[in-house]
Amino acid sequence: MPPARVRHRRSALGSVCALAAVLCGCGLQVASPDLFALTRTGPGPKLRMVVNDSGTISCNGEPAKELSDTLLLQARSLAATLATDAQNNLRLARSGQSVFSYTITLEQGTVLFSDTSAHGRSELTEAEAFALAAARGVCGLQS
């Protein structure tokens, strides 16, 4: 019979293996993080979407829907591109005859801008285009 110390190690190793098997067998999944939340205000109903890195989007509190691969890649690119602006809490004043205002919240912070203040900032124009494409194509909204 092996010494008590060896039996104890075997017992501990067996416990660790059993715990690992249980966790794997239970389908333990780690939730993917949200890439960003985007809110658009202006004429018509307010739009709020939460985009998750798993490839889903929730629109106006509705259950999550699947994003196309193209929209997911755009969302990931936007999150990376806007990270510095969010960290600096970028706020662009409304200029001219703006129609829509946007708030994009990322892990790093928040970006606020209007459709007219986004002029000349390709990453903000891309955010507007993403919001429109996702609202129409995935969320089934008219605007």
Image (cartoon, rainbow, N blue to C red):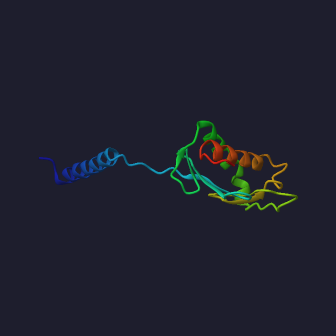
Point out residue 110 in the picture as x, y percentages from the top left corner: 69, 60
Q: Is residue 74 above or below residue 36?
A: above
x and y, in percent, of residue 134 in the image: 64, 45
Q: Position of residue 68 (x, y in %)?
A: 58, 38
Q: Nearer the viewer, residue 99 or 109?
A: 99
Q: Residue at x 22, y 51 (%)?
A: 11
What is the x, y in percent for residue 111?
72, 59
For the image, the number of numbered tags is: 0
Residue placed farthest to the top in the image? 69
Task: Return the residue found at the far right.
Answer: 96
Q: Residue furthest left?
A: 1
Q: Nearer the viewer, residue 12 or 68?
A: 68
- On the picture, is 30 further left or further right than 121? left
Residue placed at 59% from the left, 56% from the top? 60
Q: Residue at x 50, y 52 (%)?
A: 63
